[in-house]
């Protein structure tokens, strides 16, 4: 009797661990080539797509190799982990993005070190961040997180709630809205994944029609290791890629993304 291969084992085969500068340089070049090909398929300029490497669970010594290979910004889901790495790797020229759910009691940490926050989904968090940023005398780029899969386990605003939420954000002058972020459904069905990206693009377009200033540049952060090429085809301006650059993770997905059972950065075939 055969048994299904665990997702972590499949991911390990698909995403070998990068352990040298050459490994990281090769992985980065491969991801960028795939981004370029996806953009060109739909008539987009590849330069309009930003690659955000995601270093969650990756130890500092391997992050140093990735930086040596060309990474200049890194994304982390958990604030505590991001803050620790920021301290331990303070000698590196790296901008840190917090891309996971934030509790208000961690707003001070984000305000202290983060270059951007990609998971804004409540006014309580907006108020807490703004208060800490005002005290620090600096602004912060933020993305509004939208739940495009309608899964109760995922964080993010419902699409219908976005207009009212955006209307409140000018009260928090330290927050600079750059656009929107989403996690697609974790599925091997490409059309279901693609539909989530289309929902986010539609949310952006509708909000821009009402008030262009409310969405800033209107960036779309969507797509991870398992689905970033699809995301680029649907208009992503930022893709958050971890495993395809650093290698597969053994850490359960549920530690970082609620309700997930597939690969860390997207569905694993």
Image (cartoon, rainbow, N blue to C red):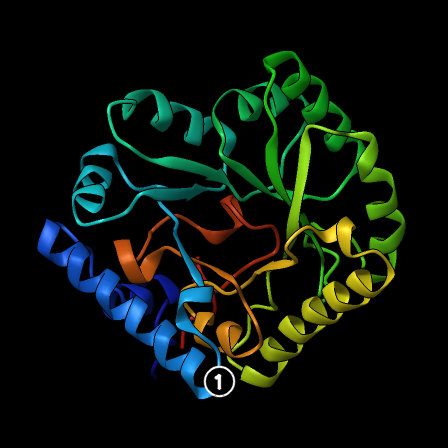
Task: Please tell me which residue is depicted at 72% across the width and 52% down the height of the picture.
Answer: 215
Most foreground residue, 115 or 107: 115
Instruction: Note whether residue 20 is visible.
Output: no
Residue 38 sits in which quadrant? bottom left
Q: Residues within 10 Å of mark 1 (few under 14, many from 20)?
A: few
Image coordinates for residue 82, horizontal then vertical, percent = 43, 31
Task: Please tell me which residue is depicted at 81% across the width and 58% down the height of the picture.
Answer: 158
> Which residue extends farthest top?
135
Q: Which residue is mark 1?
A: 43
Give the vertical position of 207 relative to 117 (above or below).
below
Instruction: Note whether residue 142 is visible.
Output: yes
Side (left or right) of 117 relative to 40: right
Most foreground residue, 229 or 16: 229
Quadrant of the rendering where the C terminus is positioned: bottom left
Image coordinates for residue 239, horizontal then vertical, percent = 46, 61
Image coordinates for residue 106, horizontal then vertical, percent = 60, 23
Give the vertical position of 234 relative to 249 (above or below).
below
Image coordinates for residue 198, horizontal then vertical, percent = 67, 75
């Amino acid at each position: 009797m055969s048994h299904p291969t665990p997702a972590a084992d499949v991911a390990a085969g698909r995403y070998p661990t990068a352990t040298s500068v050459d490994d990281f340089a090769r992985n980065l070049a491969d991801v960028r080539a795939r981004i370029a090909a996806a953009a060109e398929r739909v008539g987009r300029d590849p330069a309009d797509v930003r690659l955000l490497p995601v270093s969650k669970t990756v130890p500092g010594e391997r992050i140093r190799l990735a930086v040596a290979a060309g990474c200049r910004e890194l994304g982390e889901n958990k604030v505590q982990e991001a803050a620790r790495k920021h301290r331990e790797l303070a000698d590196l020229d790296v901008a840190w993005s917090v891309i996971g759910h934030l509790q208000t009691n961690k707003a001070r940490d984000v305000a202290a070190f983060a270059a951007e926050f990609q998971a804004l989904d409540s006014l309580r968090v907006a108020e807490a961040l703004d208060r800490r940023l005002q005290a620090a005398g600096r602004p912060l780029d933020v993305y509004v997180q939208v739940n495009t899969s309608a899964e109760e386990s995922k964080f993010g605003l419902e699409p219908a709630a976005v207009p009212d939420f955006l209307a409140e954000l000018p009260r928090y002058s330290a927050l600079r809205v750059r656009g929107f972020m989403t996690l697609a459904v974790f599925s091997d069905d490409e059309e279901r994944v693609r539909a989530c990206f289309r929902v986010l693009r539609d949310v952006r377009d509708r909000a821009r029609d009402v008030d262009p200033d409310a969405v800033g540049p209107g960036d779309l952060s969507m797509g991870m290791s398992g689905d970033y090429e699809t995301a680029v085809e649907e208009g992503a301006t930022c893709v958050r890629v971890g495993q395809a650059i650093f290698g597969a993770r053994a850490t359960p997905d549920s530690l970082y993304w609620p309700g997930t059972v597939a690969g860390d950065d997207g569905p694993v075939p």
